Amino acid sequence: MISGDVGEDAGKIWRYLDQHGQSSFSAILKGAKLKQRAADRAIGWLTREGKLEFGRDKNAELISLLR
């Protein structure tokens, strides 16, 4: 079931950000050990739930948990 996988992947991203703080998309991919498509879906899920915020640092978009 896709939604179960998305929920699990969202959990991986949430835990990664909780431990590491604000991170780039590429760092999240590597740290959470997800493929891009899975990470895109999970980030969309977390964004829809109001759990993420986005910022920029020079050339990189940064993602962090909304506290």
Image (cartoon, rainbow, N blue to C red):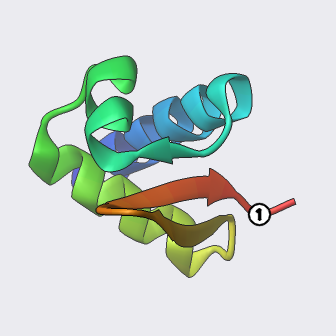
- Residue 22's spot in the image, x, y percent? 61, 45
Is the residue 58 above or below the residue 64 in the image? below
Residue lying at the far right in this picture: please name it.
67
Residue 37 visible, this orientation: yes
Q: Residue at x 64, y 26 (%)?
A: 20
In this rendering, position of residue 66 left or right of residue 49: right
Residue lying at the far front in this picture: please name it.
58
Q: Nearer the viewer, residue 46 or 59?
A: 59
Check disc 1: other Cα within 10 Å, few if <14, some if 14-19, many if 20+: few
Is the residue 52 above or below the residue 20 in the image? below
Q: Nearer the viewer, residue 47 or 22?
A: 22
Label 1 sits on residue: 66
Q: Residue at x 49, y 38 (%)?
A: 13
Residue 43: quarter of image:
bottom left
Q: How many marks?
A: 1
Q: Nearer the viewer, residue 35 or 1?
A: 35
Q: Residue at x 37, y 54 (%)?
A: 42
Residue 40: quarter of image:
bottom left
- Residue 49's spot in the image, x, y percent? 63, 74
Residue 1 visible, this orientation: no
In this rendering, position of residue 18 left or right of residue 6: right
Q: Nearer the viewer, residue 28 or 8?
A: 28
Is the residue 20 above or below the residue 64 in the image? above
The kind of secondary structure element at disc 1 is loop
- Residue 27's spot in the image, x, y percent? 35, 32
Q: Quadrant of the C terminus?
A: bottom right
In this rendering, position of residue 1 left or right of residue 16: left
Q: Amino acid at mark 1?
A: Leu
In this rendering, position of residue 28 left or right of residue 50: left
Q: Residue at x 45, y 66 (%)?
A: 45
- Residue 57's spot in the image, x, y percent? 47, 60
